[in-house]
Amino acid sequence: MTDHTVKSFGEQLETLSALVAQMGGLTEAQLASAIEAISRRDSAAAERAVGGDARIDEMQAQIEERALKLLALRQPMAVDLRETLAAIKTAAELERIGDLAKNIAKRALVLNREPPIRLTQSLARMGKAAQNQLKQVLDAFSNRNAEEAETVWNRDGEIDEIYNSLFRELLTYMMEDPRTIGLCTHLLFVAKNIERSGDHCTNIAEVVYHMVRADHLATNRPKADTTSETAVPYESHA
Amino acid sequence: MPAMRESLPWLRGKIWPLLLGAIAGGAAVLLGGSGLFWGAVTLALAVALITQFITFQEPVLRPAVPTPDDPLGLLPPQTRLLLEQLPMPVMLLDGTQRVLFANQFMRDVLGPGLDRKRVSTVLRNPEVLLAITGAGHGEASNVPFTLPVPVERHFQAYAARVSVTPPVTVLLLHDLTMVRRSEQMRTDFIANASHELRTPLAAVTGFIDTLRGHAKDDEVAREQFLEIMATETARMRRLIQDLLSLTRIEMNEHVPPEARVELDGVVRQAVAGLMPLAAEDGIAMVVDSVPGLPPVLGDHDELVQLFQNLVHNAIKYGRENGKVTVSLGLQDGQLVAAVRDEGEGISPNAIPRLTERFYREDVKRSRERGGTGLGLAIVKHIVNRHQGRLAIESRQGEGSVFTVFLPAAREENGEKPATPEPVTEML
């Protein structure tokens, strides 16, 4: 879409920011539909999420193009440069979250064809936590609020804890009744996707912090995800 | 006609009166003479022009004097006052989709600092943004949308164009949260109640049948069964009470409380009420507070219930002859209240699920001590309503700490328009 009028540089930056916010809105809707598909067994919501991913990818391309033009033509400096970079990085993270949401939705379609399993409640809770992180970090981006970004960054442990607990529970479930392995594997992937979405939100938080403060949040983010070291002992019921 | 209006601005607003005056004058001359027929024709023409005036003219917000926070002078002070008083969220946007004006209710929904921002920066919902863009082209629309976090809220958004020159669109929100919640609460309550009551009711029915049947004359059995029936019915009563409590709290979860409450008094009230229960287990209760703590914006009764539930849990699951400590403090502008017990602790697997409705880590022990499985769900929803946070830490063998963070109330400043009344009626 070409501009008919010569916009001021400030306005162009603002438009770029507004586009990122808009893409954020689409991603939020995407994640919401995916989580709803799981928690309310709503396959219509799942279909919406699967279909909505293309638009998100489009927007990322659009934002990148605009940002590149801005960099090439205006050669921004200091905070303007950081804002332009932040737009590109944030768009990339949002696109990943959109993809993860689509994947969750696809698995929801599979899960909803089977009888309900009570572990989806924990998944729903995890999903809400991830949605909360996404909303807050996007607000932080729009309001240029470094403190809010830092809060999001620190709170990732909450999602990790639910994930750890869910992981162990799923392993136990599968061992007790091997007929549930198929379903539980899907649930494991969904849980992993939600946990990854949370991580992408903290990445956005780091980007926002850098954009505002020109400084980096500590490189060692407290990571509470212990599933890579988790083993559940197998007791043979011979 | 419109083109003429654009090119001769001094004539705008005066052209219609002039035209009508000429027609009326002409009609008077013709009617006064012998041209009755021509008089009637002129009058008919005048009527036709008047109806045109009524149907095609778009209302124009007359430009007023520009002010610092309204640089284009688009909002006359009376309009601003009227919109501020409207008991629903209203927002006005200009031709570049920037916020011209947002009233208090809108600021309550979207947060402060909205003026002059691009609308997509403050409201990201794709359906609403589409509706606003459509409205900018003259297509009014009505779309439902949801804000899922932090507390689920449902709205109906109405977007329409108010005027063409200058270009102004309006966004009006209708809060459907209460309606949706009522429906959901009713369904949930019925589902929960019938599920949880089924077992105790079955037990009581069974005992009644037995007492009527082969235990009719068995004195010992009768006493035993009546004892069990009394316990079960007491449990059912507590369950209904807790469910009603939870329903009431969830209904109002999205309405932030407004009264100023001192947590010190609340905690002491909760602890005092539980003294007899603590004494039964030989548990000592300690309140550790600092003077001069700021109040919170809260609902007094709900906060008392919150601490009652936390302290009751501490007593229930604490070590006999141990200690339960409630400490109050201030940290980073937030009030911090921690309830600590010296019980067996909670397994790390269970901690994330503790606030789930009817989730019990140790079902047998919870039942023995009269638990309904709803205590922490109630705590969670009260904390949510108060825009606070709940943190749970536990060490197996050492005990647990439940910490509540609540934002301190800021200083009073000016009058706010009335917020919707919280619901006190049950289903």
Image (spheres, grey):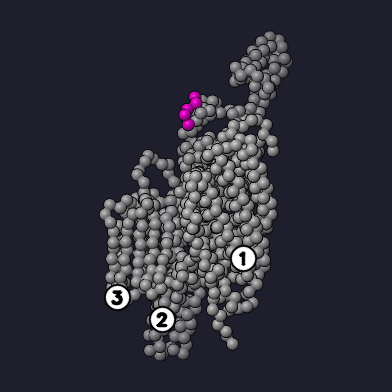
Q: Is residue B293 magenta?
A: no
Residue B170, image x, y percentages: 57, 37
Highlighted magenta segment, given as a residue range: B65-69
Residues under labels 3 and 1: Cα distance?
46 Å
In three-dimensional space, the C-alpha distance between marks 1 and 2, rounded to whole angstroms, equals: 46 Å
Q: Which secondary structure type mostly characterizes the magenta part of the structure?
A: loop
Residue B364 is left or right of residue B2, and the answer is: left
| Circle 2 SS class | helix
User: What mark, if any, has residue B321 been given in the picture?
Assistant: 3
Residue B118 versus residue B4 in the image, above or below: below
User: Circle 1 sits on which residue?
Assistant: A189
Q: Residue at x 60, y 68 (%)?
A: A188
Instruction: Pinpoint the chain carrying mark 2.
Output: B
Tag 1: amino acid: Phe
> Which one is nearer the viewer's eye here, A117 or A194?
A194
Chain containing mark 1: A
- Identify the residue under disc 2: B228
| Camera-nearest label, 1 or 2 | 1
Q: Are marks 3 and 1 on the same chain?
A: no
* Residue that appears at 64% across and 56% down: A99
